[in-house]
Image (tube, rainbow, N blue to C red):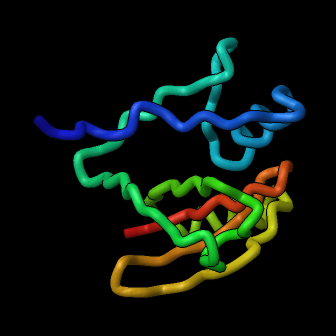
Amino acid sequence: MKIKGFGGIFLRSKDLVSLRNWYEKTLRISMGEWNGSIIKPDADNETIFSLFHNDSDYFPKEQSVMLNFQVENIEAWMEHFSKIGVPLIKGPEKSEYGTFIWISDPEGRWIEVWEK
């Protein structure tokens, strides 16, 4: 037996339409009438499942979950975010794992964007 991958990421929202529109404009995740999207990763895509101690300051303590999107050409994403007025909250940070930047959705959730 093996884990094939995550089956989904589900967020509660105070304003579903606005949040759906933000994700479409900002991260280019087009959602259907059912308020969802199916993302089919490439062969070189990885999904990381990681636990953080309650005291970790890696993302805001009041946020129980953080989304991470693996991307190609993180520089182009930073230009895109700048053009549409979405500021980086943190980054870029480079390490042996790749380059990371962070943005926030309209409800204040940090989103990590990663290029391997």
Q: Quadrant of residue 48?
A: bottom left
Measuring 63% from the left and 30% from the top, which residue is drawn there? 30
Measuring 66% from the left and 70% from the top, which residue is drawn there? 59
Residue 63 against residue 10 in the figure, above or below: below
Q: How many marks?
A: 0
Q: Specify the farthest residue to the front.
A: 54
Residue 84 against residue 73 in the figure, above or below: above
Q: Specify the farthest residue to the left.
A: 1
Q: Specify the farthest residue to the top.
A: 33
Residue 33 against residue 17 in the figure, above or below: above
Q: Is residue 17 left or right of residue 29?
A: right
Measuring 42% from the left and 87% from the top, which residue is drawn there? 95
Q: Position of residue 105 (x, y in %)?
A: 77, 52
Residue 54 against residue 64 in the figure, above or below: below
Q: Position of residue 3 (x, y in %)?
A: 23, 40
Measuring 48% from the left and 33% from the top, which residue is drawn there? 8
Q: Quadrant of residue 63?
A: bottom right
Q: Quadrant of residue 4?
A: top left
Quadrant that contains the N terminus: top left
Q: Is residue 105 left or right of residue 11?
A: right
Quadrant that contains the C terminus: bottom left
Q: Is residue 10 left or right of residue 46?
A: right
Q: Position of residue 18 (x, y in %)?
A: 86, 34
- Of 1 and 19, nearer the camera is 1
- Of 41 and 49, nearer the camera is 49
